[in-house]
Image: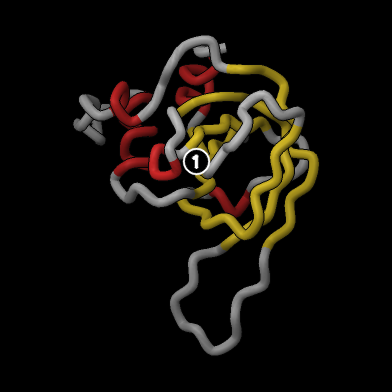
Amino acid sequence: MAFAVKAEVRDPEAASFTFIAQKTMYGGKRIAVGDTVFLFASENEGGSGLVARGVVTSAEAIARTPGLTRQTPRVSVTVRRTALALRPLGRSELKPLTDWNDGQPGSELNFKFYRQATNKIIGVSDQAAAFLSAFF
């Protein structure tokens, strides 16, 4: 399965990235070593959207805090960069794709990333992974 991470990415050209205790949604908690990851530099943190593709080299679920009834699963992951994006894909490119039920990969990404614009790790469909791969 493929995943996408939207988080602060200070140096898109770094050889690897570590994301600590990241919020997960839409199946993101299933991320595991060997999975393909598309990295989005969060616009909330001054980033520009899709910047790199990589492979997960470590993944560790964060234990839930006892006594809290509603908790979003969190994971820490390390990703080895395998490619840099060749063209832009971010909020401005995905914003027009508002028919979230049309089955299009761009609409899936708009819904999962920008409906709730927090940083997160998400699972993406095979169609969305193929769509994202075209940017490399």
- Residue 100 showing in the rendered view: yes
- Residue 103 showing in the rendered view: no
What residue is at 32 percent from the left and 41 percent from the top?
114
33 to the left or right of 19: right
Q: How many marks?
A: 1
5 to the left or right of 45: right
Quadrant that contains the C terminus: top right
What residue is at 47 percent from the left and 11 percent from the top?
87
What residue is at 46 percent from the left and 23 percent from the top?
127
Could you say where residue 93 lies in the image, as x and y percent from the top left?
A: 31, 21
Q: Quadrant of residue 62?
A: bottom right
Could you say where residue 115 lies in the image, as x and y percent from the top left?
A: 29, 45
Q: Quadrant of residue 88?
A: top left
Amino acid under disc 1: Lys
Element carrying mark 1: strand
- Foreground of the two, 68 or 12: 12
Could you say where residue 65 lies in the image, as x and y percent from the top left?
A: 59, 80
**Residue closest to the far bottom:** 67
Quadrant that contains the N terminus: top right
Q: Against 131, is 116 above or below? A: below
> Mark 1 — residue?
6
Q: Quadrant of residue 107?
A: top left
Is disc 1 surrounded by few (<14), some (14 to 19) or many (20+) residues within 10 Å? many
- Foreground of the two, 14 or 72: 14
What residue is at 45 percent from the left and 43 percent from the top?
45
Could you say where residue 35 lies in the image, as x and y percent from the top left?
A: 70, 35
- Foreground of the two, 42 or 129: 42
